């Protein structure tokens, strides 16, 4: 909770720390009523600091200071000053040992930041600024220290005591307590500190590094979850091998631990050698976990592992540089997942997320550059812009350099900055130095917020056999950035003729092959291709080579042509989306005029040929058969009419189902998999296509479709199929079956918390009317817990973020409900409260009636006393922008 209006912190005010901490020795005595932390810090003045007489100011929050001494001499009250967020000691020597003993109450910590309890175990989350809730410290990433940590607790309740690095000593005390000492030889900032104490069991495996060193790998879980660790373990081993093969990066300690906890604010955390994971990102088995769940585990395990180099060995100088580690690591994990599964599908999924959620962020009140210039609460900046757009920026660099130079660049970056806390600028500089290129203009991707619009026009001159592409870019204003300079936008492209791609002769140059990257660097530019023998259909932004909104006036026939002829899977999918957008927009306009909407028959024909195209990857078929999502339609529209989007889309889906019923039945029957479950690309593709077909068929309300869904619900051997059937039955008009599956599903899975989350979520996203009241009712269900972020996300987050038609019900009750929950969560868990605000912050996009109701709820939150800095920042910026 804040004392006063939160302060804004600016990147331009960055100063090196006045003190450095060479060594950090921690002793934790964990007890049920209180825990005592003794921190012994070897400090010295930073020779690089401007003020060599500065007072020592340590961060600290919600701590009770018991004793403080310098070089063994206890300080008197007059020697220091404690405020709600700091400990100041005016006079200190140039080099000294500071010892602080503080008391904390982890069992009362519901913010899940610092040291807290999840069920019966103690665990920590220190990034970004949670360490200051454990002890007084220089809690900033450019203060790196070696840590030794001793954890002492009751032996029976907490047989497992873990921290970073190597276990170097342990022993029993005579009062039923025991202790373990850990030593982490690598210097690290406090945000990478971790501690776990609990009654846990583990699965173990081993990895031998390229240098021949043995690494013990352990995953610690509650005993009942031991059977759900195999996938995370194999994902970890694959990640370790991949990072050696692709980046030449080896693991650097002989132990790597993962611990799964139920109560966690996000997915996982890369603490040095002791990763702490949300159970949802580590546990997986076919009966309880969907394909998407398996893929998430693989991706998150890899992400956290890759941080060992991109984040831990080379860390961030300050939190404005967060994307240095996050953008780069997301790029690394995306490439890893692409290598493990289907590259095109992974790309399509990532671009979909970017285009809906990140583009929406760029267009909203919280828009910020990949390297923000200011913030009030850093927790609010773990965003899709920092992560996903940051990854796109690294991807563009990788593509600009090409694989060999990019590898030289990453080698140089890791070698040059190993053990340092650095900036995004250091990353770009390493790339420039390694590849000998100039990225001056490219750097604007780090400093300018907003999604650039790129409008392209093509003119074919048959007589001259030339084709010219005129490109105009501009980027809309974002809060605090009215004017933008042109970006350097690498646009991968090809020109397609009737019989395939045409050779590219840009400006009369030699044949550059069938695909090339043109560098868009000016506000307006024309690229002329010569020797173009026929009027081509341009294939633009292949592979989504830059995070921009590109427009080209394609006819529907052009889009159909791209859908079936482009060699780039991303473009084929994108063309299907653009066609879907055109068709839906036409229907929305008809609905708004009170006319009868119709579905362009060309869409149906296209879908039919996709369904019949044996050469296409089945996962791609499933993706291409999905109309643009409601979220995407919302993102690309102004004055959004949620109900018109929903109605148009529902009607289009029903028409597709009616007209392609035979083909859909075939897809359903042909993709029934009888083999043992594997989360392999092939099987995932089959299930995805089959379940897409099932969802369409259920719209027809036939007994035959219901039978197929019920059969699948009752007999499938994996959660993907069970849940797909469960979802379609819930969204159907078959009331009796609905009640039956709701009851059966809960009874069967009530002891699997993660499956219960799926049960909550399926109900929360159900599009039938009355869902809001149903969701309110579920909040009193015994399995619901407002203190558990997974439950909050599954029920409240999913309802407000993924059930547009019900969240935006016309009387504003959905908005009121969300505001009530945010007010309740504000004091319990500010980070979760602030994240939940997302749907309300976009109020300006909606048609007037909704807009005013949404704004009124933001104002109601704003008027609450005791708003956390997290919630205050988002609400105040949303109302201001
Ligand atoms: N680095 C953590 C995120 C920490 C979020 C703190 N509010 C997980 C990750 O990106 O790997
Ligand atoms: Zn990360």
Image (cartoon, helix red, strand yellow):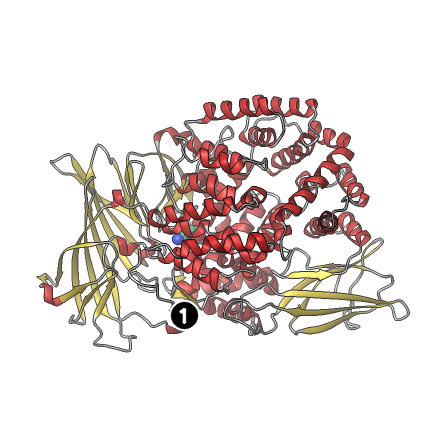
Q: Is residue 332 visible?
A: no
Image quadrant containing the N terminus: bottom left
| Number of disc labels | 1
Does the image show residue 205? Answer: yes
Residue at 48 percent of width and 60 percent of height: 878
Q: Looking at the image, which is closer to me, 132 or 603?
A: 603
Taking the image as shown, residue 240 lies to the left or right of residue 475, namely: left
Relative to 214, say whether 139 is above or below: below
- Please give left or right for residue 149 compared with residue 606 in the image: left
Query: Which residue is at the front of the view, 11 or 571?
Result: 11
Give the quarter of the image for residue 696. Answer: top right
Q: Position of residue 109 (x, y in %)?
A: 28, 46
Q: Name the residue under label 1.
A: 11
| Location of residue 171 in the rendering, given as x and y in whole percent from the top left corner | 17, 40
Say whether residue 432 is left or right of residue 636: left
At horizontal 36% and vertical 62% (from top left) the residue drawn is 419
């Amino acid at each position: 909770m804040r004392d006063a209006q939160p302060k804004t912190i600016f990147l331009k005010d960055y100063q090196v720390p006045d003190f450095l901490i060479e060594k950090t020795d921690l002793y934790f005595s964990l007890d049920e009523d209180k825990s005592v932390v003794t921190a012994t810090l070897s400090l010295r003045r930073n020779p690089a600091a401007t003020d060599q007489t500065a007072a020592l100011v340590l961060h600290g929050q919600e701590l009770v200071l018991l004793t403080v001494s310098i070089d063994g001499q206890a300080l008197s009250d007059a020697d220091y000053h404690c405020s709600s967020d700091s400990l100041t000691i005016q006079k200190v020597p140039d080099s000294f040992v500071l010892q602080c003993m503080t008391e904390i109450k982890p069992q009362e910590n519901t913010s899940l930041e610092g040291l807290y309890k999840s069920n019966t175990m103690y665990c920590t989350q220190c990034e970004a600024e949670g360490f200051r809730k454990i002890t007084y410290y220089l809690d900033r990433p450019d203060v790196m220290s070696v840590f030794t940590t001793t954890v002492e607790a009751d032996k029976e309740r907490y047989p497992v005591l873990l921290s970073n690095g190597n276990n170097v000593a342990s022993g029993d005390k005579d009062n039923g307590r025991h202790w373990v000492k850990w030593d982490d030889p690598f210097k690290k900032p406090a945000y990478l500190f971790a501690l776990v104490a609990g009654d846990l069991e583990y699965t173990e495996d081993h990895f031998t590094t390229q240098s021949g060193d043995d690494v013990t790998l352990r995953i610690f879980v509650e005993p009942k979850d031991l059977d759900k660790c195999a996938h995370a373990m194999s994902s970890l081993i694959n990640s370790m091998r991949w990072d050696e093969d692709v980046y030449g990066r080896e693991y650097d300690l002989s132990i790597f631990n993962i611990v799964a906890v139920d109560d966690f604010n996000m997915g996982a955390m890369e603490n040095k050698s002791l990763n702490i994971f949300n159970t949802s990102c580590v546990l997986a088995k076919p009966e309880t976990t969907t394909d998407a769940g398996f893929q998430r585990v693989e991706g998150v395990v890899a992400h956290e592992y890759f941080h060992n180099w991109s984040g831990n060995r080379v860390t961030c100088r300050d939190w404005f540089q967060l994307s240095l580690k996050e953008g780069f690591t997301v790029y690394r994990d995306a490439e890893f997942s692409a290598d493990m599964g289907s590259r095109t599908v992974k790309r399509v999924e990532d671009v979909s997320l970017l285009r809906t959620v990140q583009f929406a962020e760029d267009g909203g009140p919280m828009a910020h550059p990949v390297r923000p210039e200011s913030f009030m609460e850093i927790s609010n900046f773990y965003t899709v812009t920092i992560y996903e757009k940051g990854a796109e920026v690294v991807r563009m660099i990788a593509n600009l350099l090409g694989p060999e130079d990019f590898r030289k660049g990453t080698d140089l970056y890791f070698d040059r900055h190993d053990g340092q806390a650095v900036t995004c600028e250091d990353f770009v500089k390493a790339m420039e130095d390694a590849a000998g290129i100039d990225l001056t203009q490219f750097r604007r991707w780090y400093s300018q917020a907003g999604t650039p619009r790129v409008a392209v026009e093509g003119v074919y001159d048959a007589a001259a056999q030339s084709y010219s592409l005129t490109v105009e870019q501009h980027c809309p204003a974002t809060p605090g950035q009215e004017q933008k300079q042109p970006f350097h936008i690498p646009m991968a492209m090809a020109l397609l003729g009737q019989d395939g791609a045409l050779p590219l002769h840009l400006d009369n140059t030699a044949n550059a092959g069938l695909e090339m990257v043109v560098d868009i660097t000016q506000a307006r530019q024309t690229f002329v291709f010569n020797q173009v023998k026929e009027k081509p259909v341009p294939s633009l932004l292949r592979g989504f080579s830059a995070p921009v909104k590109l427009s080209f006036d394609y006819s529907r026939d052009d889009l159909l042509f791209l859908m079936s002829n482009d060699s780039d899977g991303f473009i084929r999918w994108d063309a299907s989306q653009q066609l879907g957008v055109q068709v839906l927009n036409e229907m929305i306009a008809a609905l708004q005029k009170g006319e009868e909407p119709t579905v362009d028959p060309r869409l149906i024909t296209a879908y039919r040929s996709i369904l019949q195209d044996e050469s296409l990857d089945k996962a791609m078929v499933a993706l291409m058969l999905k109309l643009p999502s409601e979220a995407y339609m919302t993102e690309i529209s102004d004055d959004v009419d949620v109900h018109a989007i929903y109605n148009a889309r529902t009607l289009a889906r029903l028409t597709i189902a009616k007209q392609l019923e035979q083909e859909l039945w075939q897809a359903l029957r042909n993709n029934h998999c009888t083999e043992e479950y594997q989360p392999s690309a092939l099987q995932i593709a089959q299930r995805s296509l089959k379940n897409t077909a099932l969802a369409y068929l259920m719209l027809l309300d036939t007994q035959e479709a219901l039978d197929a869904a019920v059969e699948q619900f009752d007999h499938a051997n994996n959660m993907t199929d069970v849940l797909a059937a469960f979802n379609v039955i819930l969204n159907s008009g078959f009331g009796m079956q609905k009640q039956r599956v709701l009851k059966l599903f809960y009874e069967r899975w009530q002891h699997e918390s993660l499956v219960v989350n799926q049960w909550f979520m399926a109900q929360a996203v159900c599009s039938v009317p009355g869902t809001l009241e149903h969701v309110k009712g579920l909040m009193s269900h015994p399995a619901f817990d407002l203190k558990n972020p997974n439950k909050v996300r599954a029920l409240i987050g999913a309802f407000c973020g993924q059930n547009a038609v019900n969240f935006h019900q016309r009387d504003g009750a959905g908005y009121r409900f969300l505001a009530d929950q945010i007010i309740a969560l504000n004091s319990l868990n500010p980070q979760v409260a602030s994240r939940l605000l997302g749907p309300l912050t976009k109020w300006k996009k909606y048609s007037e009636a909704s807009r005013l109701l949404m704004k009124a709820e933001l104002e109601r939150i704003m008027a609450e006393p005791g708003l956390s800095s997290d919630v205050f920042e988002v609400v105040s910026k949303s109302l201001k922008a």
